Image (cartoon, helix red, strand yellow):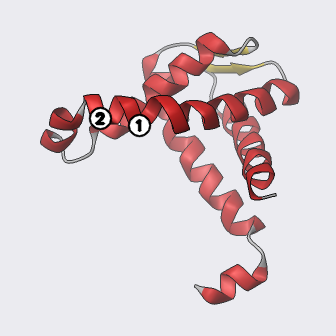
Amino acid sequence: MNFIFKIVISTLAILVTANILTGVHLDGPVTAIILAATLAFLNAIVKPLMIILTIPITIFTLGFFLIFINAFIILFASYIVDGFKVDGFWWAFIFGIILSIVTSIFEAIGRPKSEKEEQ
Protein backbone atom coordinates (compact mmCIF):
# COMPACT_ATOMS: atom_id res chain seq x y z
CA MET A 1 0.00 0.00 0.00
CA ASN A 2 2.89 2.35 0.75
CA PHE A 3 4.29 1.90 -2.78
CA ILE A 4 0.91 2.75 -4.35
CA PHE A 5 0.66 5.84 -2.13
CA LYS A 6 4.10 6.98 -3.28
CA ILE A 7 3.25 6.42 -6.95
CA VAL A 8 0.03 8.44 -6.55
CA ILE A 9 1.91 11.27 -4.80
CA SER A 10 4.62 11.21 -7.48
CA THR A 11 2.00 11.24 -10.24
CA LEU A 12 0.29 14.30 -8.77
CA ALA A 13 3.65 16.02 -8.29
CA ILE A 14 4.64 15.25 -11.90
CA LEU A 15 1.35 16.67 -13.20
CA VAL A 16 1.77 19.87 -11.17
CA THR A 17 5.44 20.32 -12.04
CA ALA A 18 4.91 19.65 -15.76
CA ASN A 19 2.17 22.30 -15.80
CA ILE A 20 4.47 24.84 -14.13
CA LEU A 21 7.43 24.42 -16.50
CA THR A 22 7.17 25.27 -20.19
CA GLY A 23 10.17 23.12 -21.15
CA VAL A 24 8.56 19.91 -19.91
CA HIS A 25 5.81 18.31 -21.97
CA LEU A 26 3.45 15.62 -20.68
CA ASP A 27 0.60 14.07 -22.66
CA GLY A 28 -1.72 13.37 -19.73
CA PRO A 29 -2.39 11.61 -16.43
CA VAL A 30 -1.73 8.10 -17.78
CA THR A 31 1.68 9.21 -19.00
CA ALA A 32 2.31 10.74 -15.55
CA ILE A 33 1.55 7.38 -13.88
CA ILE A 34 3.90 5.58 -16.28
CA LEU A 35 6.56 8.24 -15.68
CA ALA A 36 6.19 7.95 -11.89
CA ALA A 37 6.69 4.17 -12.09
CA THR A 38 9.63 4.57 -14.49
CA LEU A 39 11.32 7.15 -12.27
CA ALA A 40 10.82 4.87 -9.25
CA PHE A 41 12.48 2.02 -11.14
CA LEU A 42 15.35 4.17 -12.43
CA ASN A 43 15.93 5.67 -8.98
CA ALA A 44 16.05 2.18 -7.48
CA ILE A 45 18.30 0.53 -10.09
CA VAL A 46 20.23 3.03 -12.22
CA LYS A 47 20.78 5.89 -9.78
CA PRO A 48 22.77 3.84 -7.22
CA LEU A 49 25.05 2.60 -10.00
CA MET A 50 25.62 6.15 -11.22
CA ILE A 51 26.36 7.29 -7.67
CA ILE A 52 28.94 4.55 -7.20
CA LEU A 53 30.61 5.39 -10.52
CA THR A 54 30.80 9.09 -9.67
CA ILE A 55 31.93 8.91 -6.03
CA PRO A 56 35.09 11.00 -6.57
CA ILE A 57 33.29 13.91 -8.24
CA THR A 58 30.44 13.68 -5.73
CA ILE A 59 32.87 13.96 -2.84
CA PHE A 60 34.78 16.76 -4.56
CA THR A 61 31.56 18.76 -5.08
CA LEU A 62 30.33 17.96 -1.55
CA GLY A 63 27.30 16.09 -2.92
CA PHE A 64 26.15 18.79 -5.32
CA PHE A 65 26.77 16.46 -8.27
CA LEU A 66 23.86 14.28 -7.09
CA ILE A 67 21.47 16.92 -8.44
CA PHE A 68 23.05 16.47 -11.87
CA ILE A 69 22.62 12.69 -11.60
CA ASN A 70 18.94 13.34 -10.90
CA ALA A 71 18.71 15.45 -14.06
CA PHE A 72 20.34 12.66 -16.10
CA ILE A 73 17.79 10.18 -14.70
CA ILE A 74 14.96 12.49 -15.81
CA LEU A 75 16.48 12.84 -19.28
CA PHE A 76 16.82 9.06 -19.49
CA ALA A 77 13.15 8.70 -18.48
CA SER A 78 12.18 11.13 -21.25
CA TYR A 79 13.76 8.75 -23.78
CA ILE A 80 11.97 5.74 -22.31
CA VAL A 81 8.45 7.11 -21.73
CA ASP A 82 6.42 8.06 -24.78
CA GLY A 83 4.45 11.24 -24.19
CA PHE A 84 7.03 12.78 -21.85
CA LYS A 85 9.55 15.21 -23.32
CA VAL A 86 12.10 17.50 -21.72
CA ASP A 87 13.55 20.28 -23.89
CA GLY A 88 17.07 19.98 -22.51
CA PHE A 89 19.38 19.26 -19.63
CA TRP A 90 18.63 22.45 -17.73
CA TRP A 91 14.88 21.87 -17.99
CA ALA A 92 15.48 18.39 -16.54
CA PHE A 93 17.60 19.96 -13.80
CA ILE A 94 14.88 22.46 -12.86
CA PHE A 95 12.17 19.78 -13.20
CA GLY A 96 14.05 17.56 -10.74
CA ILE A 97 14.40 20.31 -8.16
CA ILE A 98 10.78 21.46 -8.38
CA LEU A 99 9.53 17.85 -8.47
CA SER A 100 11.40 17.13 -5.22
CA ILE A 101 9.86 20.17 -3.54
CA VAL A 102 6.31 19.44 -4.75
CA THR A 103 6.60 15.76 -3.79
CA SER A 104 7.75 16.72 -0.28
CA ILE A 105 4.81 19.08 0.12
CA PHE A 106 2.31 16.46 -1.09
CA GLU A 107 3.79 13.78 1.17
CA ALA A 108 3.55 16.13 4.17
CA ILE A 109 -0.10 16.87 3.35
CA GLY A 110 -1.01 13.24 2.65
CA ARG A 111 0.74 11.72 5.66
CA PRO A 112 -1.70 10.19 8.17
CA LYS A 113 -2.12 12.02 11.47
CA SER A 114 -0.55 9.20 13.48
CA GLU A 115 2.73 9.64 11.57
CA LYS A 116 2.62 13.42 12.02
CA GLU A 117 2.21 13.08 15.80
CA GLU A 118 5.21 10.75 16.08
CA GLN A 119 7.56 13.36 14.61
Q: Is residue 117 visible?
A: yes
* Label annotation for residue 3: none
Residues tagged 2 and 1 counted as in contact (Cβ below 8 A): yes
Q: Quadrant of the N terminus?
A: bottom right
Choose between 118 and 61: the one closer to the eye.
Answer: 118
- Residue at 73 percent across and 70 percent down: it is 111
71 and 42: which is toward the camera: 42
Please indicate whether residue 108 sits to the left or right of residue 92 in the image. Answer: right
**Disc 1: CA contacts within 10 A as few (<14), some (14-19) or many (>=20):** few
The amino acid sitting under disc 1 is Pro
- The residue drawn where x is 71% and y is 44% is 10
Looking at the picture, tell me which residue is in the foreground, 63 or 38. Answer: 38
- How far apart, in angstroms, are the residues tagged by discs 2 and 1? 6 Å
Picture quarter containing residue 77? top right
Give the amino acid type for the residue marked by disc 2 in the picture. Ile
Residue 115 figure quarter: bottom right
Q: Where does the C terminus fall, quadrant-wise?
A: bottom right
Image height check: is 83 above or below 115?
above
Mark 2 falls on what kind of element? helix
Residue 85 image offset from top left, x and y in percent:
65, 14
Q: Is residue 93 visible?
A: no
Residue 12 percent coordinates (x, y): 77, 44
Q: Position of residue 53 (x, y in %)?
A: 27, 28
The x, y position of residue 41, in whole percent, is 61, 33
Is label 1 in a helix, a strand or a loop? helix
Q: Provide the residue designation for mark 1.
A: 48
51 with respect to 113 (left or right)? left
Horizontal arrangement in the rendering, residue 40 relative to residue 75 (left or right): right
Q: Which residue is mark 2?
A: 52
